Image (cartoon, helix red, strand yellow):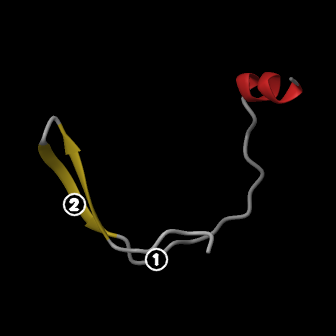
Amino acid sequence: TDYPPLGRFAVRDMRQTVAVGVIKAVEKVDKAGKVTKAAAKASKK
């Protein structure tokens, strides 16, 4: 599949929980991403 399984997550900073949530759905967006200068330079090699 294109996506990992949906579920619960927690965001921790310095061993302290700062956010929790549940992923219920993922919307796939077909967009051309912006290419950075570093990425363009790396792809030329």
**On the rendered structure, is 37 left or right of 15?**
right
* The N terminus: image quadrant: bottom right
Compared with 23, 43 (above or below) is above
Label 1 crowding class (10 Å Cα cut-off): few <14, some 14-19, many 20+?
A: few
**SS of the residue under disc 1:** loop
Compared with 16, 8 (above or below) is below
Marks 2 and 1 sit apart, C-alpha to C-alpha, by 16 Å
Residue positioned 22% across, 60% down in the render: 20
Label 2 crowding class (10 Å Cα cut-off): few <14, some 14-19, many 20+?
A: few
Residue positioned 21% across, 45% down in the render: 12
What residue is shown with label 1? Answer: 25
**On the rendered structure, is 8 left or right of 2?**
left
Q: Position of residue 17 (x, y in %)?
A: 14, 49
**SS of the residue under disc 2:** strand
Please give the label number shown on residue 9: none
Q: Position of residue 18 (x, y in %)?
A: 17, 47
Are circles 2 and 1 on residues that touch, CB within 8 Å? no
Q: Find the residue positioned furthest to the left.
A: 16
**Residue 34 lies in what quarter of the image?**
top right
Which amino acid, by three-letter code, is at mark 2?
Val
**On the rendered structure, is 8 left or right of 36?**
left
**Number of marks:** 2
Please give the label number shown on residue 20: 2
**Residue 30 lies in what quarter of the image?**
bottom right
Compared with 27, 35 (above or below) is above
Q: Position of residue 23 (x, y in %)?
A: 37, 71
**Residue 9 lies in what quarter of the image?**
bottom left
Q: Position of residue 19 (x, y in %)?
A: 21, 54
Residue positioned 88% across, 25% down in the render: 44
Q: Earlier in the sequence, mark 2 or mark 1?
A: 2
Which amino acid, by three-letter code, is at mark 1?
Ala
Residue positioned 34% across, 73% down in the render: 7
